[in-house]
Amino acid sequence: MGVKSGVPIEADFWVVHTMRDAKMLRMDICGNEAQALKAVGVAQ
């Protein structure tokens, strides 16, 4: 819900976590799967 308006909000997104030694170094939020795959270097 929008905090002030109360209007429902729906959004889809992909989150890429970069980890090292069980600690999160970085978090990238991507708008779609293709962007997420590009962020991790996987060709689609």
Image (tube, rainbow, N blue to C red):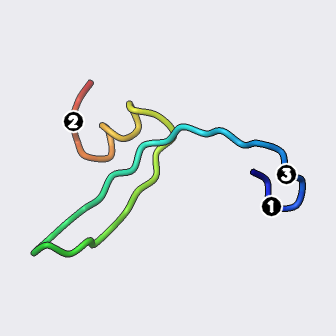
Q: CA distance from mark 1 to mark 3?
A: 6 Å
Q: CA distance from mark 1 to mark 2?
A: 37 Å
Residue for badge 1: 3
Eyeballing the image, is 29 above or below 23?
A: above
Q: Residue 38 sits in which quadrant? A: top left
Q: Amino acid at mark 1?
A: Val
Nearer the observer, disc 3 or disc 2? 3
Q: Residue furthest left?
A: 21
Pick the residue in front: 43 or 20: 20
Q: Amino acid at mark 2?
A: Val
Which quadrant holds the C terminus?
A: top left
Q: Which mark is residue 36?
A: none
Mark found first going from the N terminus, 3 or 2:
3
Residue for badge 3: 6
Report x, y in % for residue 18.
25, 62
Pick the residue in front: 11 or 29: 11
Nearer the observer, disc 1 or disc 2? 1
